[in-house]
Amino acid sequence: MKDLLDSNLSHKESKPVPLTCSYILLPVYDFICSFFGFGKRFRKKVLDAVQIKNEDIILDVGCGTGLFLSVLKQEYPDVCAIGIDIDDKMLQIARRRLHRYPKLFLSIASGESLPIKENSVDYVFSTLVIHHIPDDVKRKVIYEMYCVLKQGGKLVLVDFGKTSNVWHRVLLYPIRKFEYLEGNLNGLVVNYVEEVGFKNIRISREKFLIDVIVAEK
Ligand SMILES: C[S@@+](CC[C@H](N)C(=O)[O-])C[C@H]1O[C@@H](n2cnc3c(N)ncnc32)[C@H](O)[C@@H]1O
């Protein structure tokens, strides 16, 4: 699987995007996910948005603590999976959780500069990451996802979607102070998915304002 990694790129060349999540919450990150309904059952639903085959190669951009990858490997033990994240503290938890799984590779890297060969993966998943990325960088990250996918490969992007409801915006005001939510709420994410070249774009709204976008290269 290592030959999928592009030796010309390394995380050192990636431009880190400053993270706003507090490390104080890191030990309880998985608990918070479950509390808000983003635990294993939700990850399974995201996985079921596409039909994975055992010979597929899967990339999880912003894999965090490895919650999604653990569900993936339990369901499809034979797939090759790569998780990348910009934050080594998140990756440390992922490494502890996932060390027993074969054909699974974790790497520190930015979504802005994926250290993966072009046209090499079957599916790119990314859950709750894009709202951590500044609006002017989101497009570049989505374009990188497009580049590494094989022709016909699929993107499954899960994040806050568009809303014009003023109460939603009021409710999210505290988060908007810390995260890059504005572009998501204005519908930028789907626009970028379309702009970079994805086709057959399907959007389903899941929990409160969370969209699952499935799109094909
Ligand atoms: C809210 S967590 C989601 C983690 C995981 N995808 C999940 O659903 O549990 C956001 C993750 O995105 C990562 N992240 C933020 N900016 C990134 C970037 N530019 N490239 C790669 N990962 C990034 C963070 O380090 C963090 O692990």
Image: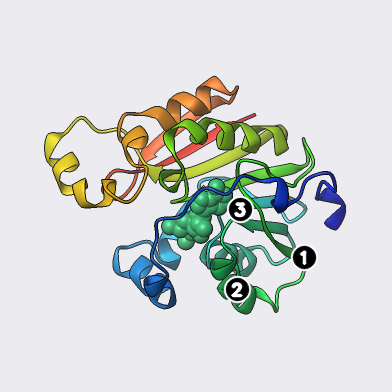
- 10 Å crowding of disc 3: few (<14), some (14-19), many (20+): many
Distance in Å between CA atoms under marks 2 and 3:
16 Å
Q: Amino acid at mark 1?
A: Lys
Q: Position of residue 61 (x, y in %)?
A: 59, 50
- Say whether residue 100 is visible: yes
- In primary-sequence order, the first of circles 2 and 1 is 2
Distance in Å between CA atoms under marks 3 and 1:
14 Å
Q: Is residue 176 above or below residue 147?
A: below
In the structure shown, which secondary structural element does the residue marked by tag 3 occupy? strand
Does the numbered disc 3 mark a residue whose Cβ is under 8 Å from ligand 1? yes
Q: Is residue 12 above or below residue 23?
A: above
Residue tagged 2: 92
Could you tell me if the residues under marks 2 and 3 are in contact, i.e. CB atoms within 8 Å?
A: no
Residue tagged 1: 103
108 relative to 102 in the view: left or right: left
Disc number at residue 145?
none
Q: Amino acid at mark 2?
A: Gln
In the structure shown, which secondary structural element does the residue marked by tag 1 occupy? loop
Q: Position of residue 63 (x, y in %)?
A: 56, 58
Could you tell me if the residues under marks 3 and 1 are in contact, i.e. CB atoms within 8 Å?
A: no
Q: Position of residue 209 (x, y in %)?
A: 28, 43
Q: Is residue 133 above or below residue 193?
A: below
Distance in Å between CA atoms under marks 2 and 1:
18 Å
Residue tagged 3: 60
Identify the residue shown where x is 59% and y is 63%.
69
Q: Position of residue 22 (x, y in %)?
A: 38, 65
- Say whether residue 48 is visible: no
Identify the residue shown where x is 67% and y is 42%.
113
